[in-house]
Image (spheres, helix red, strand yellow):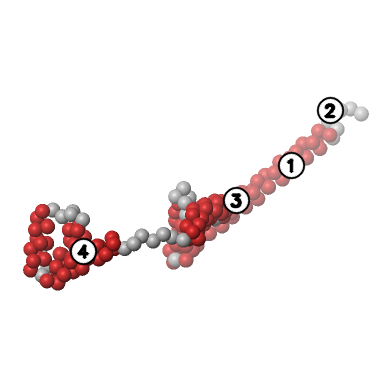
Amino acid sequence: MDCKEARQLFSAYLEAELSPREEEKLKSHLAQCQVCSSLLATIVGLGQELRNLPEVEPSEDLLHRLYLIPEKSTVQKEKFSRKGFFGWKFWLSPAFQPVLIAVTALMMIISLFSFTPVGKSWQKTAWFEIHQGYSLAQKLLVKAGVWTDKIKGYQEDFMASIKSKSPYDSD
């Protein structure tokens, strides 16, 4: 066992969490390595000194400020919850993430078709098809208008012939 491995096991050794095999390896390394054994002794000594430190009582002012912390956090939570739809937490909430993903994907597709050569050629083809369809619709409307005009002409002729005197009428 080298020093690096031994130092990684110090914490587990002090808390008695090592397996008997690992503990034996560490003890044999500590018996051979003066640096690691002095480091472990320093760590054990520090732990003892920390336990021997006197307990300090916080001041009343500090206690008062510490007790106010939960109240401040609830006020801040209320502040965020009041923002509702316009708060940034709403937009990043897990319930809204699928919408963000869909919008992002849509924007990427729009960008692909707007700013790449493939997209430009697709746009050109799409506009050509749209204009061709528009032209066809115009032609159909013109033909429909012609038919409407012809039918109105026939209607007028028919109505005029009905209103005129019949050849069988006698004066």
> Mark 3 or mark 2, which is nearer to you?
3
Residue type beneath disc 4:
Val
* Alpha carbons under labels 1 and 3: distance apart: 22 Å
Which residue bears the numbered disc 2?
168
* Alpha carbons under labels 3 and 2: distance apart: 48 Å
| 154 relative position to 139: left or right | right
* Alpha carbons under labels 4 and 1: distance apart: 111 Å
Q: Is mark 4 on a helix, strand or loop?
A: helix
Residue type beneath disc 2:
Tyr
Q: Position of residue 159 (x, y in %)?
A: 79, 36
Residue type beneath disc 3:
Ala
* Alpha carbons under labels 4 and 3: distance apart: 91 Å
> Mark 4 or mark 1, which is nearer to you?
4
The answer to whether marks 4 and 1 mark residues whose Cβ atoms lie closer than 8 Å is no
Residue type beneath disc 1:
Lys
Which residue bears the numbered disc 4?
44
Bin the neighbour count of mark 4 within 10 Å (Cα to Cα): few under 14, some 14-19, many 20 and up.
few
* Alpha carbons under labels 2 and 4: distance apart: 136 Å
Location of the N terminus by quadrant is bottom left
* Alpha carbons under labels 2 and 1: distance apart: 27 Å
Q: Where is residue 89 in the image (x, y as percent from the top left)?
A: 50, 54
Q: Is mark 2 on a helix, strand or loop?
A: loop
Whichever of callouts 4 and 1 sits on the residue coming sooner in the sequence is 4
Q: Which mark is residue 43?
A: none
